[in-house]
Amino acid sequence: MTYDLFIGDRLFSSWSLRGWLMLEMYNLPYRVHLTGLYSGSFARDLAPLAPAKLVPVLKTPEGDVIGESLAIAEALAERHPQAGLWPADASLRARARWLCAEMVGGFSDLRRDCPMQLKEVNGGFVPSQGVLDDVARVETIWQDARRLSGSQDGWLFGAYSLADVFFAPVAARIIGYDLDVSAQTHAYCIRSLSLPSVQNWRKEGLMVSYDPYPYPRYAPFRDWPV
């Protein structure tokens, strides 16, 4: 029983990283298919998966096609109840779902102005007030998750969960654009990006070169910290 996961470029596709982590971190069997997000073949690559129009897309062993990261998350949690994708406690599970849903629909300034890139740290980026407000909101909901779960460090709800999956690209944005956050938030971001799976994802992404680079860069640059 093997899933087929269709993704975009590893250095830049935040939603693809989420879809991949759902499978990788919970040891679910899968094959990866890279689509041409920047090469011009994207629509053609997704045509057999209609009506999907964005990545990631999951194809189940039975042939069902599932788009949208939150739908993929719920489908996998339903299909693999023993894997522990959501927190076991009902209150924590409800809060984790809330955080993931807010990630899907919110933080528009952070997502627009700081597109995920795993290449380097943009030391010269100057955040807008909207970005600062989004980061403050991220810190608020992370802190409240810790208050509920009692997890002072480590993952948001104690054990690694889909909440950590959904916020991994946010951690990449915070680090990649050198955004000012608390020591606890910074440590959590480094922990998330230090996972061997995330490091391997980045390593594969760095094998691809881009000319032109698809997003603005803000010098001075520093090496990726993990």
Image: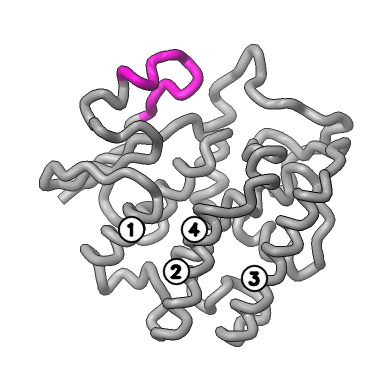
Depth order, front residue of 109/152? 109
Select label 3 or label 1 by which is in front: 3
Image vertical order of residue 35 relative to residue 64, above or below: above
User: Whole-Å distance between the Cαs marked 2 and 3?
Assistant: 13 Å
Query: Between disc 3 and disc 4, whose residue precedes?
Result: 3
Q: Residues within 10 Å of mark 4 (few under 14, many from 20)?
A: many
| Residue tagged 2 | 97
Query: Between disc 4 and disc 1, whose residue precedes?
Result: 1
**Residue drawn 49% across and 76% down?**
95
| Residue tagged 1 | 27
Give the structural element (helix, strand or loop) at label 1: loop
Span highlighted in magenta in the image: 34-44
Select label 2 or label 1 by which is in front: 2
Q: Are marks 4 and 2 in contact (CB under 8 Å)?
A: no
User: Whole-Å distance between the Cαs marked 3 and 4?
Assistant: 13 Å
Q: Main secondary structure of the magenta part?
A: loop
Number of callouts in the render? 4
| Residue tagged 3 | 142
| Residue tagged 4 | 165
| Residue 69: % across, % down | 40, 50
- Residue 145 lies left or right of residue 37; in this view the side is right
